[in-house]
Image (cartoon, grey):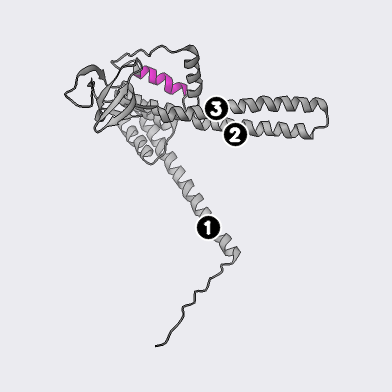
Amino acid sequence: MMNFKLRITNITIPSWRRGLGRLIVLSILLVTSVFSFASTQEDYNKANAFYGEKKYDEAIEIYNALIEKDELSTAIYYNLGNAYYKNNEIPLAILNYERALKLQPDNEDALFNLNMANKQTVDKIERLPELFITNTWRNIVSSKTVNSWTYYTIGLLFLSTFLFVIYLLAGSVFIKKINFYSGILFLLITLFCWIMAAQRNQLNLSTNEAIIFESTVTIKSEPNPTSEKLFTLHEGTKVTLLEKVNDWSRIKLPNGNIGWIPSEAIVAI
């Protein structure tokens, strides 16, 4: 019986060919991205045109299609909320205004329209009073997204580093002092922004909210339909989600009331 050996030889691809291959791949990705952006922009403009013509159902369909393709932006959620508002679908309008504000908490138009939509809901729930310092701190943290606070942190860190470099290289004592103390100041602001980013991220992880979509829903003391009735809520009301058990969700209201609601009655923000 004759034995034989299979020898595998490594094929070396010239470096210029590897470089050409990478260039081709990058070119394809770039062209694909450009066409994808152009298509998204075209659909977005088409939806806006339908909205301007008061064809709200058509506009809603396109906005939702963009969201399903992961084209998430404050503008799309905001415009979708407006279209639902014009269609008198208030819970859906509130849901999308809230989602727009999750991406851009300081969007004044979304805040104003959300306030207008909330005025049309049945439930008017007062928030439990908080300490002034606690409320102010939460408002500052929530005023920007995690990404925004991170961008500020990185930008200020580069600025403070640049000032310290000038301090080390400058020949004048006066210029050294100015750049040293300015660097310290911006470094402290950088630390503040970093803390805000961490706090905002923690707030996002710890806070799950939803909108009620049932016209009227009874909140129960336990996660079963035969348990004691606590109170009644209506569509459009925002609640905080605490936990989920089977088909029930435990919720909390701004006034501190807690109870169980069927999970199918709410949609997460």
Query: Of helix, strand and loop, which one carries label 1?
Result: helix
CA neighbours of label 2 inside 10 A, class few (<14), some (14 to 19), many (20+): few
Rendered location of residue 45, percent (x, y): 42, 35
CA neighbours of label 3 inside 10 A, class few (<14), some (14 to 19), many (20+): some
Image quadrant occupied by the N terminus: bottom left
Residue range of the region highlighted in magenta in the rendering: 106-117
Q: Nearer the viewer, mark 1 or mark 3?
A: 3
**Badge 2 is on which residue?**
154
**Badge 1 is on which residue?**
24
Q: Is residue 240 visible?
A: yes
Rendered location of residue 264, percent (x, y): 25, 30
Of residue 135 and residue 103, the one placed in the foreground of this image is 135
Q: Is residue 61 left or right of residue 169?
A: left
**Badge 3 is on which residue?**
195
CA distance separating discs 1 and 2: 33 Å
Residue ID at (48%, 47%):
33
Of residue 149 and residue 257, the one placed in the foreground of this image is 257
The number of numbered badges drawn on the structure is 3
Q: Is residue 250 above or below residue 128?
A: below
CA distance separating discs 2 and 3: 13 Å
Rendered location of residue 161, percent (x, y): 68, 34
Residue ID at (54%, 57%):
22
Residue ID at (52%, 53%):
26
CA neighbours of label 1 inside 10 A, class few (<14), some (14 to 19), many (20+): few
- On residue 244, the disc is none
Of residue 191 and residue 3, the one placed in the foreground of this image is 3
Query: Of helix, strand and loop, which one carries label 3?
Result: helix
Q: Residue furthest left?
A: 226
